[in-house]
Image (cartoon, rainbow, N blue to C red):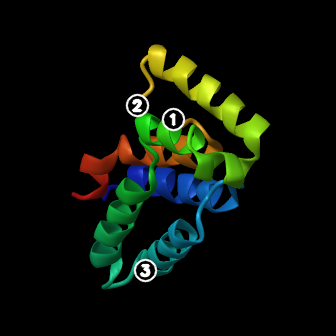
Amino acid sequence: MDRQILEYVTAKTHELMQAPTCSSETKAAAQAWLSAVGTAAEKEQTGKYVEELEADIMPIDNLIGFAGSEQGAAYFGADTAAGIVAHAKEIKAAGAQYCDCPACAIVADILAKKEDILK
């Protein structure tokens, strides 16, 4: 990975770890990757980190399905869940493929550089 990409991904990874919607699994993968940068384990951890990011980014249809379900209403609260569904449908109509919460937005930014990251 070239220096500019490394600096970009490192900065985005720090942002991701601070995002209120970042899962504990993603934080752990992010920290493992940061700890491996510059070591013999960097390439392996980079692959694992990208896999975790791809697994954790929320496709917009999944968000709509979950927030619109009984489980979503129980998790978020009925009013919040309804607002999430309305917002998700709005951004989907505008072309969004993924949730636009802080964590998912940062993950999308990182994954946009996937080819360069995995070089």
- Which one is in front in this view, the residue at disc 3 or the one at disc 1? 1
Q: How far apart in space, not on screen, are marks 2 and 1 (Cα)?
A: 11 Å
What whole-number distance in Å separates the C-alpha atoms at marks 3 and 2? Answer: 31 Å
Task: Return the residue at label 3.
Answer: 36
Residue 70: x %, y % from top left: 61, 47
Front residue (pair 69, 61): 69
- Tag in front: 2 or 1: 1
Identify the residue at horizontal 52%, vertical 72% (top origin).
25
Q: Residues within 10 Å of mark 2 (few under 14, many from 20)?
A: some
Is the Cβ of the residue at disc 3 closer than 8 Å to that at disc 1? Answer: no
How many other residues sit within 10 Å of disc 1, few (<14), some (14-19) or many (≥20)? many
C-alpha distance separating marks 3 and 1: 36 Å
Q: Nearer the viewer, mark 3 or mark 2?
A: 2
**Relative vertical location of residue 63 with respect to residue 13 in this rendering, above or below:** above
Q: Please give the label number shown on residue 97.
A: 2
Mark 3, secondary structure of its residue: helix
- Residue pictured at 61% horizontal, 59% vertical: 22
Q: Quadrant of residue 13?
A: bottom right
Counting other residues with Cα less than 10 Å from the Cα at mark 3, is it few (<14), some (14-19), or many (20 or more)?
A: some
- Does residue 60 appear in this view? yes
Q: Earlier in the sequence, mark 3 or mark 2?
A: 3
